[in-house]
Each structure stands twice: as C-alpha cells, then as structure tokens.
Amino acid sequence: MTPDKLLAFVGFSIVLAITPGPGNTLLTATGASVGVVRGVPAVIGFAAGMAFMMFIVAGGVGTIIISFPIILTAVKWAGAAVICWLAWKIASARTSGTASSARPLGFLGAASFQWINPKSWLAVTSGAATFLDPTRGNTYLQALMLALIFGAVTLPCCSAWLAFGAAIQHVLRSERARRIFNVTMGVVLVASVVLIIT
C-alpha cells in the first residue's frame, strides 16, 4: 500500500469509527452504566471484532457472504433484529442499580456484536473493496495490515464514546434521569439501524 493510500485508509477508518452508529451508542450506554474502567473490555472487544472482521472480509472469506445478495440481506436483517432487541433491553433496563452492580458488555459480547452490526458490514466491505489491491502483493498480508490499522484506529475512537457515557454518569443520579437516558439510548440505537439498512 502506498503512503497516500495508507493515509487515506487511516482517514476512512477514523470517520467510520468515530461517527455515531449502533456500536458507539452501545458503548455510550455501557459507559453510563458501568464507567470507563469496567467498560474497557468492551472497547477492546469492539476494536478486535472490527479488526478480525476486516481481515476475514479483505482476505476473501467474506466474499462468500458479499457475493450472494440474499445472504447479505439475511445477515443485515438478522443483525437489525438483534440490535432492536438490544435497544429494548437498554430502554427497559432497571434504573435502581448502581454502576458497581451493573453488568458490563464485556470483550466477547462487543467483539461478537460487530458481526450483527450493519454499519460494521458496510464499513469493512467498502474498505476492503476500496483499499485492497490484489496486484500489489499477498492478499492476506494486505488484509492483515488493513485489519491492524482498522483495529488500532477503532480503539481510541470508540474509547471517546465510552468516556462520554461515563462522563454523564453524574447527571444520571435520579431514577427518572436514568430511565430517560436508557429510553433515549434505545431509541437512538433503533434509529441508527433504520438509517443504515434503509
């Protein structure tokens, strides 16, 4: 990959990782629920999940799913259904607990989430299609480089959303405030999926 193309891919990765979407909404809710320290495994899981997904798609395995529109559509709608279910869980979560008693999303949950997130599929497929160059060496090495860069960029970008959620914890002291926040996060999560799949 040329330096210009590398810089362009870093910019592409930053834009995709920092913009609102289902994953960043979930991280904001996680930060507000359990704080930064207990939310760190979720951020690492998000970054690792995105990196692994980029490697799989760019390396060629993902082309099986991408090549068959019916499979891609099924993945997209199944993912949307799961995200709507998660939105319901967030919106209807108990508000009487404290951050110390809440259960964080965790590494595996966050990493697995990428595979049902329509924004993740759009990001990795467009990134792989745009920046992978089969004429410039080993495809798997290129896929690995794209994956490592994508994961490295995702980590600080997603950390900002977790920190934002944790920063507003002090505003969410009352049960009413927590209920409003949870319902708002649930609605935003559903809205982000609707915007992506339509």
Image (spheres, helix red, strand yellow):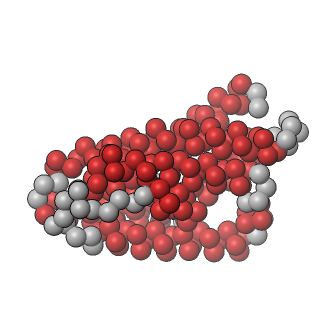
Residue 106 appears left or right of 176: right
- Measured as percent of width and height from the top left, residue 88 is found at 35, 73
Quadrant for the C terminus, please.
bottom right
- The answer to which quarter of the image holds residue 151 is top right
- Whether residue 39 is visible to the viewer of this picture, yes or no, is yes
Total marks shown come to: 0
From what the image shows, is residue 66 above or below residue 146? below
Quadrant for the N terminus, please.
top right
Taking the spot 76% from the left edge, 69% from the top edge, the residue there is 68
- Whether residue 132 is visible to the viewer of this picture, yes or no, is no
Q: Residue furthest right?
A: 135
- Measured as percent of width and height from the top left, residue 189 is found at 40, 62
Identify which residue, 124 or 97, lies in the foreground: 97
Q: Residue furthest top?
A: 3
Taking the spot 56% from the left edge, 38% from the top edge, the residue there is 152
Q: Residue furthest left?
A: 174
Taking the spot 71% from the left edge, 25% from the top edge, the residue there is 3
From what the image shows, is residue 193 above or below residue 34? below
Taking the spot 32% from the left edge, 63% from the top edge, the residue there is 103
Residue 8 appears left or right of 39: right
- Measured as percent of width and height from the top left, residue 141 is found at 78, 41
Residue 161 appears left or right of 175: right
- Measured as percent of width and height from the top left, residue 194 is found at 47, 65
From what the image shows, is residue 104 above or below residue 148? below
Identify which residue, 46 or 8, lies in the foreground: 46
